[in-house]
Amino acid sequence: MKNLFSYEGKRCLITGCFSGMGEATARIVQSLGGEVVPVDIKKPTTFPFEKFYEVDLKDPVAIEQMVADVASGGPIDRLFYCAGLPNTFDRLDIMLVNFVGLRHTVETAVPHMPRDAAAASISSAGGMGYLGQMQNILPFLATQGFAEGKKWLEEHLDDGWIDGYASSKMCTIVYTLQRGPTLTTETGVRLNCISPGPTDTPMMPAFVEATSQEFMDNYPKPVGRNSTPEEQGWPMVFLNSDAASYISGENLYTDGGTAGGLMTGSVKLDIPAGMGD
Ligand SMILES: NC(=O)c1ccc[n+]([C@@H]2O[C@H](COP(=O)([O-])OP(=O)(O)OC[C@H]3O[C@@H](n4cnc5c(N)ncnc54)[C@H](O)[C@@H]3O)[C@@H](O)[C@H]2O)c1
């Protein structure tokens, strides 16, 4: 039987490749035979690569140049957008890296992706409240391209719902749910995301700083602990594998059950309301 989890012969563009979940994802892809095309704003340290792309994903021209150069070497079979900023950064920068840069990377890469290709990104359990913000998110998502999206954000930054982190993650989920189906119909490319709970990566201290140690300790974790980066990398690798060939427009909660429990009342949030990871 064909191994549908194999990445043999697949060129995989991975952003946020030199830390946390992105690095874990890249190592898994390599172990399954895939070729990793690494992208990050910094140089590799513990994960050596002869060729890598040092790109600021807040810069649309840098994204376009990177995608064009990658595509000149062959098709982009898989896209993993794992880069992100936590809620200790400037709100606009968070929105640009976590969402506008994601959308621009996907839309720029798609013309270079074959029909059985796939893209996956990382939202967050912090984006779980997206249904309550649809009236705000949909007009923003109607913008086209990086410049229009950035201009809209600059004009609406103080509308009240754009906190930076949770808002960027809500936009990622709604974009995935809305664009996945149309992208797949138009091009064959599947689009999905995951929504992790607290995960022990170099980003975790920023979440503690932005909330508190008490908040992170009391955050409901049905599994009884934080996730490892690999426990997020594997679901990303699954969604972009041929084993997930009938999955598109999906947000997969990789939070050990927290979201389901909160939505149905079987898990309680004993922490100040309105604070997400
Ligand atoms: N760690 C958690 O608890 C947690 C929970 C839910 C969701 N997430 C999300 O998971 C994703 C991965 O985060 P992580 O925990 O692995 O953090 P991390 O800090 O280890 O990795 C983030 C990576 O993004 C890169 N990056 C940041 N800004 C960039 C830019 N402008 N251009 C290019 N690359 C840039 C960083 O250099 C880094 O390699 C993020 O989107 C994060 O919001 C994290």
Image (tube, rainbow, N blue to C red):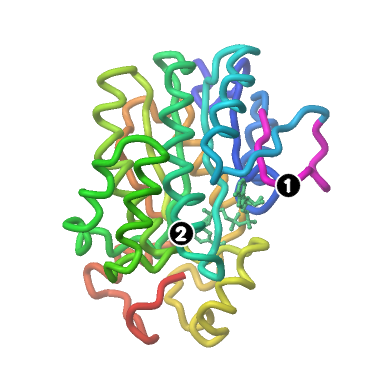
Establish if 37 lies above or below 220.
Answer: above
**In front: 143, or 238?**
143
Quick one: SS at disc 2? helix
Q: Residue furthest left?
A: 135
In the rendered image, residue 66, in percent from the top left (x then y), is placed at 61, 28
Quadrant for residue 39, please give it: top right
Asked whether mark 1 and ligand 1 are closer than 8 Å, the reply comes as yes
- Left/right placement of residue 244 relative to residue 198 reads left
Establish if 30 lies above or below 71.
Answer: below
Q: Which residue occupies 55% across, 32% down?
A: 61
Q: Which residue occupies 34% across, 18% down?
A: 188
Q: Please, what is the dominant secondary structure of the magenta stretch?
A: loop
**Quadrant location of ligand 1?**
bottom right
Establish if 66 lies above or below 220.
Answer: above
Q: Which residue occupies 60% across, 34% down?
A: 62
| Amino acid on which the number 1 mark rests in the picture | Lys
Q: Which mark is residue 241?
A: none
| Amino acid on which the number 2 mark rests in the picture | Leu
Q: Is residue 246 magenta?
A: no
In the rendered image, residue 241, in percent from the top left (x then y), is placed at 48, 28
Q: Which mark is residue 42?
A: 1
Quadrant for residue 40, please give it: top right
Say which residue label 2 marks.
Answer: 92
The span picked out in magenta is 37-49
**Mark closer to the chain start, 2 or 1:** 1
